[in-house]
Amino acid sequence: MKLPLSLLLVAGLAGSLAVSPASASEPGHKAEGKVEAKAEAASDSKVEINIKPDLAKGKGERKTVAKAEVKADNKAEDKTEAKPESKTESRAEQGAEPRQPVSMGELRDMIEHKISEVRANRAPAPVVRLQTKGGTKGGASRQVAKSAEAMAKPHAGGHWEYEGPNGPAHWHELNPEFKQCGLGQRQSPIDIRDGIPVELDPIQFEYKLSAFRVIDNGHTVQVNVEPGNRIMVNGRRYELVQFHFHRPSEERLNGRQFDMVVHLVHKDLEGKLAVIAVLIEEGKSHPIVQQVWNNLPLEKNTEQAGLQGIDLQQLLPEDRRYVTYMGSLTTPPCTEGVLWMVMKKPVGVSAQQISIFSRLHPMNARPVQPIGDRLIKDGQ
C-alpha cells in the first residue's frame, strides 16, 4: 500500500528530530545540528521547534518545513549577560575559578582580621619609669616608693625618724645617701661654746612681705616662701627658700637648750646653703608664729596657702648679733658645707603656741654632734 508523499515527509522529519546529538553531524541532519548549536550558545534562551505546513506553488503538494525559533526573554539582558558568560567560560577553560561576590559582613570580618594581625605584630611601647627624689631641705625623707610592708619594717627604704630603730643613731644605715650622718666630721647641731670673740660682718636682711605656703612634711612644720627674700653676708647673697621649726632647740649655747628653734634656709646661685637659726623661749605670743599656726593644713604632706602675706622681719630678734661655724644639715642626708649663723638672743612665743607645735611633733631635734677642730666665731 502506497502512503501519500506528505505523510512520508512528516515521518522522516519526526525521525530526524529524534536523532541524538552525536548523529547530528551526519549527512542529512545539518539543519538540526545548527539548531542545537544555537541552543547551546545561548544558555539563557528558549529553543522552540515549530513544524508548519507550507503549500508549494503550482504543485498542490504540501511541504512541511521545520523552523527553529530562538526566542530570548529579553534582548537587552541577553546582550548584557553574553559578555560575563563568555569571560566565565574562558576562565573555566583556563582552569581559573570565577570570583565570588563578597558580602558586607565578610568584608568587615576581613578588616578586623587584618587589624588583629597588625596589633599582634606591633612592638610594645617602651616602659618609662620615673624616679622622684623626695624630701626637702626641711627634712623630708628621700624615697622613691613606699609600700605598706616596707614602712612597717625598721631600716626599710630610708624612712627615718627621731626616735627608735630609725632614729638619729641609725640614719647612716638606712640609705647609702645618708652615710654622712654617721661618717661626717662637720655635723650639726653642736653645743656652741668657746667661740673666738670677733666683729662679724653684719647680716643684711632684705626680707619683704611675701606670700607663703605651710606644709607638715611628717618631720616638721615648714613654710615655703615666694622668691625675693634675701640676705647678704661676707659678700655673698643668699635667697630664702623656706623656714621650719624644731622642738626643743637643736643648737645649744654654752650648754643651754631652748624651748624651740626656727631655721631659715637660704641658698646662693652656686647652690651653697646658709642657715640662720633663731632660738625660741617661752614668753609673749608671737604674731608670725601664730600666723603660721593659723594656716596649718588639715592633712600632712599637703600645702596650705596663707591668706595674707607674711612679714619675715618680725621673726628676727632686735639684737642680731650671732655666732657662726661650718656644719651640715641636721636631717638626712646630713650634707656638709653649710654656713650656720645662730642668733645669740632668742625670741619669745607663748606657752600655748609651743603646745600647739608639741602636739604635732613632741620631739624633732637631732642630738648635738662633736665639734672636732672646727672654728667658732662669736660676734661681739
Image (cartoon, rainbow, N blue to C red):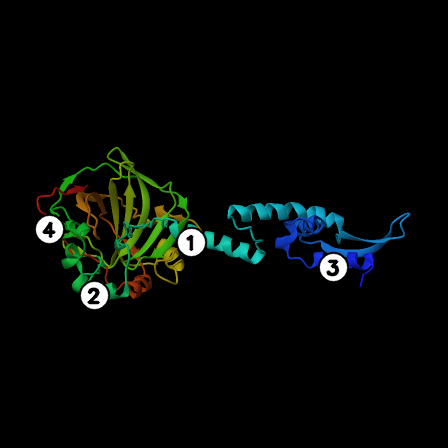
Mark 3 and mark 2: span between their CA atoms? 113 Å
Q: Nearer the viewer, mark 3 or mark 1?
A: 3
Please tell me the numbered disc located at residue 14: 3
Mark 4 and mark 3: span between their CA atoms? 138 Å
Residue 221 relative to residue 255: left or right: right
> Mark 2: few, some, or many residues within 10 Å (few <14, many ≥20)?
few
Q: Nearer the viewer, mark 2 or mark 1?
A: 2
Q: Camera-side residue: 76 or 125?
A: 76
- Which residue is pictured at 36% across the width and 48% down the height? 123
Residue 47 relative to residue 126: left or right: right
Give the residue number, with chain letter if any, for mark 2: 153
Image marks 4 and 1: residues in contact by CB distance under 8 Å: no
Q: Camera-side residue: 312 or 101?
A: 101
Sequence-first disc among 2 and 1: 2
What amino acid is labelled 4 in the image?
Answer: Pro
SS for callout 2: loop
Image marks 4 and 2: residues in contact by CB distance under 8 Å: no
Sequence-first disc among 3 and 2: 3
Give the residue number, with chain letter if any, for mark 1: 305
What amino acid is labelled 1 in the image?
Answer: Ala
> Mark 1: few, some, or many residues within 10 Å (few <14, many ≥20)?
some
What x and y, as percent, mark residue 91?
Answer: 55, 46
Image marks 3 and 1: residues in contact by CB distance under 8 Å: no
